[in-house]
Image: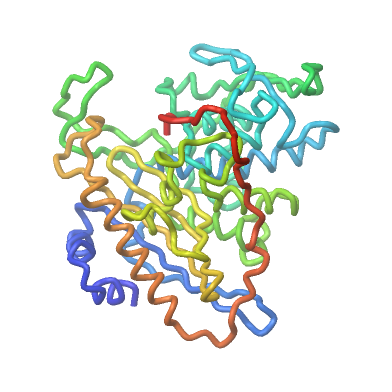
Amino acid sequence: MLQNLLLQSGFELVKNVLGNKDSFRVQIIYTQIDRDKKNNPSFKNYYFNVDSNLYFNPASTVKLPLALLSLEKLNKMNIKGVNKYTALQIDSSYSKQSIVLFDTTSQNGYPSIAHYIKKAFLISDNDAYNRMYEFVGQQNINRGLHEKGYESIRITRQFLGLTAEENRHTNAMRFIHDDGRLIYRQQPAYNPDSFYFGKTIKLGKGHLNSNDSLINEPIDFTYVNNVPLEDLQQILQSVMFPASVPKQQTFDLTKADYKFLYQYLSQFPSETNYPKYDSSQYYDSYVKFYFRDSTRHLPYGVRVFNKVGWAYGFLIDVSYVVDFIHKTEFMLTSTLYVNSDGILNDNKYDYETVGWPFLYDIGQVIYNYELKRDRKYQPDLGRFILPYEKRAAGDSRPLIKDVDN
């Protein structure tokens, strides 16, 4: 059904990518959502070329499970005065670790778990991911996900170019009052667990090394982060519809946590006060790939709750799409590889010419199909209508540009 729907669209780019699925390593999951008379949702997945053994680099999509694990850890710690908004400071406890004492992009001038999650979702900030990784710890990240049934997920690396051993060590950090008084100190951690990496994964015909010299050999992805596409889809579904997945696969989150996640999974950078992003650079559809076109805006009434990633020529988007005007909802999760010259690490990927246009095209095909699809019961989407921020007139703070993401 999904393949026919996409091919019947008439988009030549879609036809070309689907017709060369092996070279583009494309995988797509389209999830139809139907409601009963009590508004309870049911889900039906349609697949194109989905294969847990077909590796793609998950890139920044790993920030989604890290955000959930960070909130879950805070709830399990259950320490008075420590929550996602509590100011924290990060120490250096091992080789190549760095100290963070302040964050000028936040309202109180300090980092916090909430602020890192916001930055990770709003524009896919890489430092935010690294700090959540350090907070949860490599052992707890992987044990936590495996215990929830996501056994094929492997998150072993920060985005810092560290060695395998350095990634096993994570920083000490302090939760503090805004006046600097200590509330709780988390000790540095080390992960002694071993990992199963399975088969060797090498991609490309060559790559640039750290000195920008061309090495005529593939890059070895065997030991890097891995998240199968079906797991990404299920993790997002567990956030948006926690009652729809097995209890084991949910995260220990509060009602306030869910509301917070819904806001920042869907809020635009232009609506955000802290950080104050340059909305000409980080426009509304910047991390909404299924609606990322020349207008840079989403259709009126549409919100996308999602997480994207891009690295090494891979593009990924896991989304829950809502149209409040037309009472429409669906999920769409996909990845493809766009690197026609076969050279990795050269920052010459086909994102602009193939990757983003393809994701936009399939997003529009599914969106327009959903607008016309018959539903026995119209969904009540009220719980996803959220109060978003609005920047104050006359705010003279400098705009934030050129973030590492």
In x, y percent, where is residue 36? Answer: 63, 82
Between 188 and 139, the residue placed more toward the observer is: 188
The chosen color scheme is rainbow
On screen, 129 above or below 53?
A: above
Quarter of the image that includes the N terminus:
bottom left
Name the residue: 51% across, 76% down.
326
On screen, 333 above or below 191?
A: below
In x, y percent, where is residue 120? Answer: 53, 39
In x, y percent, where is residue 114? Answer: 65, 37
For this view, does 22 lie left or right of residue 166? left
Return the residue found at the far right: 80
Name the residue: 38% across, 58% down.
290
In x, y percent, where is residue 189? Answer: 63, 22
Name the residue: 56% across, 28% down.
397
For this view, does 87 lie left or right of residue 283? right
For this view, does 206 lie left or right of residue 405? left
Name the residue: 20% across, 38% down.
204
Q: Number of callouts in the render?
A: 0
On screen, 227 above or below 183?
A: below
Quarter of the image that includes the C terminus:
top left
- Which image quadrant for residue 16? bottom left
